[in-house]
Amino acid sequence: MSYLLLTLAILSEVCATSCLKLTEGFTRLWPSIGVGIGYALSFFLLGRALKHIPVSVAYAVWSGAGTAAVAGIGVVAFGESLGKLQLLGIALIIVGVVLLNLKGSH
């Protein structure tokens, strides 16, 4: 159940972060409200997940998965590009999350 909460927290954070661009500097009401609700829900769910998942593991998964997902959404939805260094950075984030999870299992 804790990993389901963490997954929902990640999805909520990714939605909120992706909607930031749609707020046009917080000048558009509904996207701005969506961003606020998305982040609030994400932190609530992350806090609930932390009852059973170590903070180092949960935060690494939450932030790493969110970063990688938002980078992908930027490419697909907003026409942004990723160069070799950005792709390397995403790969290093994924490796770091995996290593933290391996340490957490010992």
Image: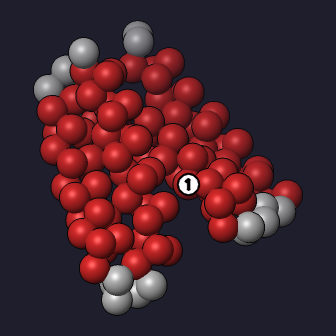
User: For residue 73, which quarter of the picture?
Assistant: bottom right
Amino acid beneath label 1: Val
User: For residue 37, which quarter of the picture?
Assistant: bottom left
User: For residue 45, which quarter of the picture?
Assistant: top left
User: Which residue is more in the foreground, 102 or 42?
Assistant: 42
**What is the x, y in percent for residue 6?**
32, 31
User: Which residue is more in the foreground, 28 or 43?
Assistant: 28
Q: Mark 1, residues whose alpha carbon is within 10 Å: few (<14), some, or many (≥20)?
A: some
Task: Give the image's coloring scheme.
Answer: secondary structure
Q: Is residue 52 visible?
A: yes
Residue at (63%, 34%) from the top-left corner?
95
The quadrant of the rendering that contains the N terminus is top left
Residue at (70%, 42%) from the top-left corner?
91
Residue at (32%, 22%) from the top-left corner?
4
**What is the x, y in percent for residue 38?**
28, 55
Residue 14, placed above or below residue 34 = above
Residue 7, placed above or below residue 14 = above
Residue at (22%, 29%) from the top-left corner?
49
Count of labels shown? 1
Q: Residue furthest front?
A: 30
The quadrant of the rendering that contains the C terminus is top left
Taking the image as shown, residue 11 lies to the left or right of residue 35, namely right
The residue tagged 1 is 70
Q: Can residue 54 be seen in this view?
A: no
Disc 1 on helix, strand or loop? helix
**What is the x, y in percent for residue 82?**
78, 61
Q: Residue furthest right?
A: 84
Taking the image as shown, residue 88 lies to the left or right of residue 7, namely right
